[in-house]
Amino acid sequence: MRVPALFVVRFAHGGAMDPVRAVMRLGGAARRGTLLAQGVTRRAIDAAVRDGALCRPFTGVLALPHAYPYAAQACYFDARVSCVSAVRAHGLRLLDPAEDLHLEIAAARGGTASESKAREGVVLHRTRSHRQGSRIVPVARALDMMSHCVSPLAQLVAIDHALARGDLRRSEMADFTVTPLTTRRWLEHAAEPGAGSVPETCARVAMRAAGLHVEVQASLGNGKRADFLVEGVLYVEIDGKSYHSDPGQFTEDRRRDRRIVAEQKSVIRFAYADAVYHPDRLVADVLACLEAIRTR
């Protein structure tokens, strides 16, 4: 998802700034005071609200009716969507669904603990490294901030996807300032742009933690690839959540399994839940298969 940057707009339309265009340029939501400071008149704002071109989701905040859902709350707190919420907004994979809205604000900024509609389901991250910018922090910043709220494995799932899409360079992880040093070094070592799904990341991490040599996206020839080749002798395939509802993929997987057997190699296949929720069992089964191969 590409999010428009924040701009200071000073254009005029018929002698007065258009409040709708101003809010649009400010990311879909803006404080009333910001609009007034930029030359939008109270009369123009009230007219836009009456016409339905703008709405007032929270006190002092104007928003486009179809703006990014969290733009108004981010504007209310003068914050940026960050952490797992920004990762989701950028379209990256998440190990676990993120229900709350995670916002990033400056550590020195004042605030109140009073209850309000805008605070419902909001997690505020106060940080000294906060910078102003677009309503949603960049990918690298979002991935770094994840260390506040998720496990290193969950952070790695999103990092793998960002590397695969080209949204993150491996060198950028060295600039993470929020992620603890030991976690950051593990992420740099464990990250793999070849991961094609959440369960593939989980399975790879579990197998390598058990000391196994794991080749990712192992070639089967003719442009075909298997998820993993373990110890050079055992192909491991991971089925995604939609596996049973995709007849085409099911047929292709069977064809790929036959190709592996024809090459006198072995293949073992796991479900999504095996890799994500029971990685210890997955590793035990892989080790058992490897032992059987060695003793043939």
Image (tube, grey):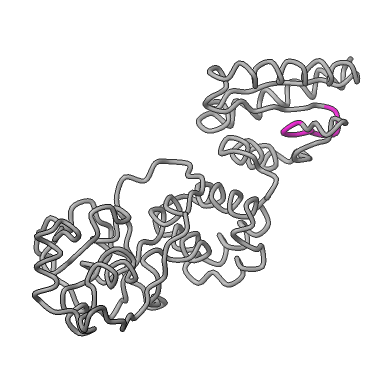
Q: Magenta region, mostly helix, strand or loop?
A: strand
Total marks placed = 0
Residue 228: in magenta span: yes
Residue 137: in magenta span: no
Residue 256 vertical position relative to residue 185 in the rendered view, above or below: above
Please state which of residues 200 and 24 is positioned toward the viewer in this rendering: 24
Is 36 left, or right, of 229 in this rendering?
left
Q: Residue furthest front?
A: 14
Please state which of residues 182 and 83 is positioned toward the viewer in this rendering: 83
Placement of the C terminus among the 4 image quadrants: top right
Residue under the point 33% across and 57% down:
102
Q: Position of residue 116 (x, y in %)?
A: 10, 59
Q: Quadrant of residue 24?
A: bottom left
Is 42 left, or right, of 266 in this rendering?
left
Q: Position of residue 7 (x, y in %)?
A: 37, 77
Residue 74 vertical position relative to residue 291 in the rendered view, above or below: below
Residue 91 vertical position relative to residue 247 in the rendered view, above or below: below
Q: Position of residue 48 (x, y in %)?
A: 15, 64
Q: Quadrant of residue 209?
A: top right
Magenta stretch, residue numbers: 226-233
Q: Quadrant of residue 77?
A: bottom left
Please state which of residues 170 and 50 is positioned toward the viewer in this rendering: 50
Residue under the point 41% across and 70% down:
5
Please state which of residues 75 and 227 is positioned toward the viewer in this rendering: 75
Q: Position of residue 261 (x, y in %)?
A: 85, 16
Is 29 left, or right, of 195 in this rendering?
left
Residue under the point 53% across and 50% down:
158
